[in-house]
Image: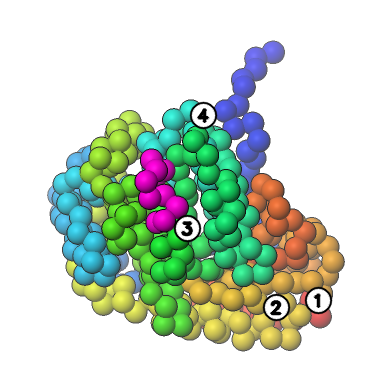
Amino acid sequence: MQSLVSRLSSAQTTIFTEVTAKSNQYHAINLGQGFPDYNPPDGLLQLVGSKIKESHHQYAPMPGVIALRQAIGKKMDVKYGVQLDPDEEITVTAGATQAILTAIMALIQPGDEVILFEPAYDSYRPSVELAGGKVRSVLLERGDFRIPWQWVRASINDRTKLIIVNTPHNPSGTTLDKEDVEILSSIVSGTDIRILSDEVYEHLVYDGREHSCLLSHPVIRDRCLAVFSFGKTFHCTGWKVGYCAGPAWLMREFRKMHQWSVFSVNSFLQAAFAEYINDESHYAYLPSFYQQKRDFFREQLEGTGLTPLSCDGTFFQVVDYSAVSDLPDTVFIDTMIREVGVAAIPLSVFSAEGHQNESLIRFCFAKTEETLAEAGKRLKKLR
């Protein structure tokens, strides 16, 4: 019998695939997987249509269409005060997950150790393993999901080469503040540790907060690759277009990996985004847009027995269900899908160790008010 040794022997089908399949099977409202149930902005759709009719059908340049890279550079300067060379410091990618894997492959060598904070977006760990690295996990604080910086310092050794941060944070909805960034800066200063900053929810920050772009910090700037997503920003996750930004010396290594995996990204979508993001109003409204959805969803949770935790950013709401069940989170989710008709994601799957059996699940509120209201109505059956 033929056999094959898997490079990811511990990896299985993602929880998102499983929950979506089960949600479809039971005709449940899917608040699990993180995608909107509404279309991208009309203006963007019209631009895409016009670009399809133009001559944007052949390979784009490997780093991305220059007009888009220039528009990204302008946006980063206006919003964060970060000056980037579009020729050397910005690369357009086939979504953020591809950018994350590409960055990890570029930034570490086999045997290097990588610090990541759990619970964490589920692509980080397998990406490190594919690159031959070793994960050193630091558990976020219970309750508020803040980074325990004392444990970060204790985890660093001469094999530590990369720290992965995510702000706003998926799945918890927390954000890094200026003090966090200063502490991180002090930790890596004088070392050869690089930073990978996942900032795909950069525009989804609430209650007057401002996003902390790590490239805006002078010490971190020269050792950081930051990843962003047009899909998350403009409600078009299926288009799979994002970008990576960082200093030229790291971007050269990033592009070496990028050219042999994806090479180039959809040409007419790049042409459309290049024009669309030049207007700041096309993304400036997003904090209030999503805060309204967050607040509306939290209102729908009243009377369900589910207790929402703080949500500073992203389009995810973590809730504590301990008042209505003592089942493990994976079992509770399965029961909720079958008996209540609403799907969510168990928080334990975002952590290989720790944060188990804490009665926490994650909902996505990037949905229409009609969808969220119906979900709230069904969730009241939990009481």
Q: Residues within 10 Å of mark 4 (few under 14, many from 20)?
A: some
**Image point (32%, 60%), residue name:** 217
The mark that comes first in sequence, 1 or 2, is 2
Residue that mark 2 sits on: 307
Q: Which amino acid, mark 4?
A: Gly
Secondary structure beneath dot 1 equals: loop
The mark that comes first in sequence, 3 or 2, is 3
Q: Position of residue 271 (x, y in %)?
A: 20, 56
Q: Position of residue 58 (x, y in %)?
A: 20, 41
- Residue 203 shown in magenta: no
Q: Position of residue 200 (x, y in %)?
A: 41, 60
Which of pointers 4 and 2 indicates the residue nearer the eye? 4
**Image point (38%, 75%), residue name:** 210
Say left or right for 58 vs 99: left
Which of pointers 4 and 1 indicates the residue nearer the eye? 4
Which corner quadrant of the image does residue 348 belong to?
Answer: bottom right
- Residues rendered magenta in the picture: 185-194
**Label drawn at residue 323:** 1
Residue that mark 4 sits on: 111
Residue that mark 3 sits on: 166
View extreme (right): residue: 326
Q: Residues within 10 Å of mark 2 (few under 14, many from 20)?
A: some
Kindly indicate whether the residue at mark 2 contacts the one at mark 3 (C-beta within 8 angstroms): no
Secondary structure beneath dot 4 equals: loop
Which of pointers 3 and 2 indicates the residue nearer the eye? 3
Q: Nearer the viewer, residue 336 or 280?
A: 280
